[in-house]
Amino acid sequence: MKYFSSIATVGTNLVALGTVMAYSNGALAASINNRPIEKIPTGTSLQTIFDDIKVSDPGINVVNDQSKFALFDNTSASGAIGTLVAEIAGFAPGNQFGLYSAKNPNNQALIFDGASSPFEQAFISFFDNGDVKVNNTLVATGFGNSFGFYLHTPENNTFYTEDSLNNGNPQVLAYQGDNQTKLKINGLDSGTFVDTEFIFAFEDKPFSGSDKDFNDMVVHISGIEPVPEPMTILGSALALGFGGLFKRERSKRQKN
Ligand SMILES: [Ca+2]
Ligand SMILES: [Ca+2]
């Protein structure tokens, strides 16, 4: 009997594991980019932008501090805040920035339209029914809890935080807070760049023919966390599954 109950437990764990794997094959398949890229010219204007908003060290290095994360979830119960930090581009009057659903990149929530300029801010609310509001206006439904960020340009290109959606090319560099560096954005009071904050720096021309300066749209977002790699989730599921199995076996032994 003991064996049967153990097999049943393993079966339940495998079903749970299967669910996680199915999920990872869908929404999470491309949550990780290959970073850093070093094609960004050193001493670029993006580094100057980061240095200008830095109040205290260690600061943000445009090459070494690139984050591999491409998909995100909200981490604050009250939503996220976006701040447009810089737009150094001929397309600045037309470039649009927003977030897209990981399960359907065509499902998009516009955050900053072309008329937006530094240092405009937006308040993004995520609802438990999948609705997304920006500044209290409904902009998307059926979003799910995993998303990326996009830039839509006047040339009708849309570039995504997931390289896999840009023919494998990097169109966005992401920088995660280090819990140390202090930033000050224009007239806003300074604050620590914590790990639930990211800065996204977009290139607004297709990578191969672009100037690769990644300063065309630079946005700071607070209140988000990276979606973990599928392998990390798999590892956690295995640990949880086998942990539960051993605990049950132990308690059974104690009863006997
Ligand atoms: Ca603009
Ligand atoms: Ca550029």
Image: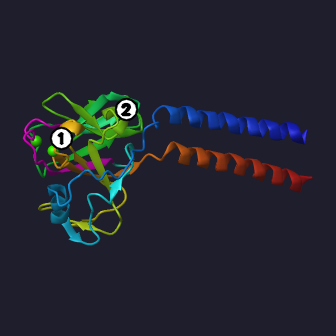
Q: Which residues are magenta?
A: 79-96
Residue 71 x, y percent position in the rendering: 38, 42
Looking at the figure, which quarter contains the N terminus? top right
Residue that carries the numbered disc 2 in the rendered image: 143
At x 18% / y 40%, what residue is drawn? Answer: 210
Instruction: Say above or below: 217 vs 154.
Output: below
- Among the 4 quarters of the image, the one containing residue 73: top left
Q: Is residue 111 visible?
A: no
Tell me residue 200's x, y (percent): 26, 49
- Residue at 55% x, 45% y: name it: 231
Q: Which mark is residue 256?
A: none
The quadrant in which residue 134 appears is top left
Secondary structure category for the residue under label 2: loop
Disc 1, ligand 2: is the CB inside 8 Å? yes
Disc 2/disc 1 C-alpha distance (Å): 31 Å
- Residue 66 counted in the magenta span: no
Question: Which amino acid lies under the numbered mark 2 shown in the image of this protein?
Answer: Phe
Instruction: Tell me which numbered mark, 2 or 1, is placed earlier along the sequence.
Output: 2
Residue at x 64% of width, y 37% of height: 16
Q: Which secondary structure, mark 1? A: loop
Q: Position of residue 41 (x, y in %)?
A: 20, 54
Task: Between residue 25 and residue 167, name the one nearer to us.
Answer: 167
Image quarter where ligand 1 lies: top left
Residue 192 image point, x, y percent: 29, 66
Label 2 neighbourhood size at 10 Å, few (<14), some (14-19), many (20+)? Answer: many
95 lies left or right of 127: left
Q: Is residue 88 on the magenta stretch?
A: yes
Q: Mark 1 is on which residue type? A: Ser
In the rendered view, tell whether residue 134 sits above or below residue 55: above
The residue that mark 1 highlights is: 210
